[in-house]
Amino acid sequence: MKDFAECIAFLGQWGLFQQVVFFLLCASIMPNGFGAFTLVFLNDAPSHHCFIPDVNLTEEWQENIIPSKVVDGKREQSSCSRYRLDVVQNLSAQGFLPGRDVNLTELQQEGCVDGWSYSKDIYQSTIVSEFDLVCSEQWKQPFTSTVFFIGVLFGSFFSGQLSDRFGRKPVLFATMAVQTFFTFIQVFSVSWTMFTVLLFFNGLGQMSNFVGAETFTGNVRVLYSSLGTCLGFALGYMLLPLFAYFLRDWKSLLLVMSVPCLAYIPFWWFIPESPRWLLSQGRVEEAEAIVRKAAKWNKVQAPSVIFQGHSETKPGPKERASVLDLLRISHIRVMTLSLCFVSFTMTFGYYGLSFNTSRLHTNPYISCFFSAAVEVPAYISSWLALLYLPRRISVISTLLLGAVPLYFIQLVPPGHSNLSLALEMFGKYAITTGSSLMFAYIAELYPTVLRNTATGTCTTASRLGSCLAPILVELGTYFKFLPYITLGTMAIVAAFTALFLPESFGLPLPETMQQIHRRKRLKCPCLSGKETPKTAVFLDGPL
């Protein structure tokens, strides 16, 4: 029985049908790009200090009622305290001058009991200024980001299983609808709690659309899995600071992020269900109908029987798989656990560096754009690596290339911030390249019946890294280089773990569990003191 790629070889790899599906799927992932980093602007804290009511104070006391101190050679006002207003009013009424008649260090201070005054130099409003997420409530800032990524975690896990059960197409459009709807109604949030709950459900829809990779074959599948989806994501990411620059209040930004997504509704009639998935469910006629439509679009003649062997199989017992199948068989278990850890490290580093680089410039719009722009060469590098290099070597190399510059950052002398920035951006370039590689790598290692469940499970593990990324950034407040040391160490450990992964370069996508059992893998030479053969064959059943 021919495999899927051989059965549809008559279509060609890059006809009109594949081109339309390719670009529509790439366009569908753009909301994920700006949705993932909208919090860079929504959750940013403008400069602020305690609000001073309109009371009778002299000009001198109005200028000095907020305590200040010198930080890094610059005088900064306190963000969370002021001198007691009743005391200052009394001193002002008696004609005493601050600093001459009154020693300010001896005055009693109080919290911002009347609220805060926020600078509008950069933003008109953010959720921080809207809901006063500062001072004693500052913990809500990183927690807001974590809640969003927890939603992404749950969405990634369940969307994989749901798409294996109900199909790729319905779940793809369902997650897009969830994302659009909850982004829109967040505009009407009247409290931080309401905003955060809606943000969690918004995260459920942040599913990467790389599941469409199995619609394509050959180099087009590699192109879509690496360059297509990722450049779509990067384009959305780069558009975010452009929109945020012209829309300085958080509600307007959310509206612009949500309403245009209604344009994706017509995509339903152009993006087909995955023929691979239909075949795995025994729905051969539906799969053939899609391929015949593709043949008509590509202006080629389809054979009378497309899926020979498949069509003769009577619908009956279908091969089913669950998360337990990822752990039941020894070599699949080792592969899955290794992929989960590598994916976790990649995503932990990616989001940690992404949120950190947005703080490297006084202008957050420029910082965000630079952080997004560096991803374009990273995705191109990933595409070239997928075309010409073995998967395992590529993943290990990107992890090591990402770790080295992060370790070197702490060796940069003070006053050479540009060198530190260059090292950090190179680290992000390498980690981003590796993250893009993982999309195609994971999809190539599992059979069709298990592919989306495995992808969802590995993505779930990776999303744990994104949930912890805001905490990683906060570590820098205690020791400046701790985030870099943490990321560099994890990347080296993950590179060693990747030695135990199978190789999939140049092999067709497995269709069944039996094929994955028989697939060859590279054997790690470090497992033996003597030279070992380069390949070993998996036997049916547990090793």
Image: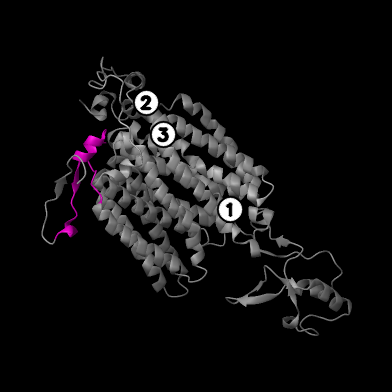
**Location of residue 314 with respect to 92 vertically, above or below:** above
Magenta range is 501-528
How many other residues sit within 10 Å of disc 2, few (<14), some (14-19) or many (≥20)? Answer: many
Residue at coordinates 53% horizontally, 56% vertically from top-left?
366
In the foreground, 497 or 364: 497
Mark 1 lies on residue:
41
Q: Pick whichever of labels 3 and 1 is earlier in the sequence.
A: 1
Mark 3 lies on residue:
163
Instruction: Name the spot of residue 314 as percent of width and height, x first.
Output: 28, 19
**Location of residue 300 with respect to 182 vertically, above or below:** above
**Location of residue 357 with respect to 278 vertically, above or below:** below
Residue type for callout 2:
Phe
Mark 2 lies on residue:
17
Any part of residue 205 in sight: yes
Q: Pick whichever of labels 1 and 2 is earlier in the sequence.
A: 2
Q: How is the image coloured?
A: one colour
Helix or strand or loop: what does disc 3 sit on? helix
Measure the C-alpha gap from mark 3 to mark 1: 32 Å
In the foreground, 22 or 348: 348
Helix or strand or loop: what does disc 1 sit on? helix
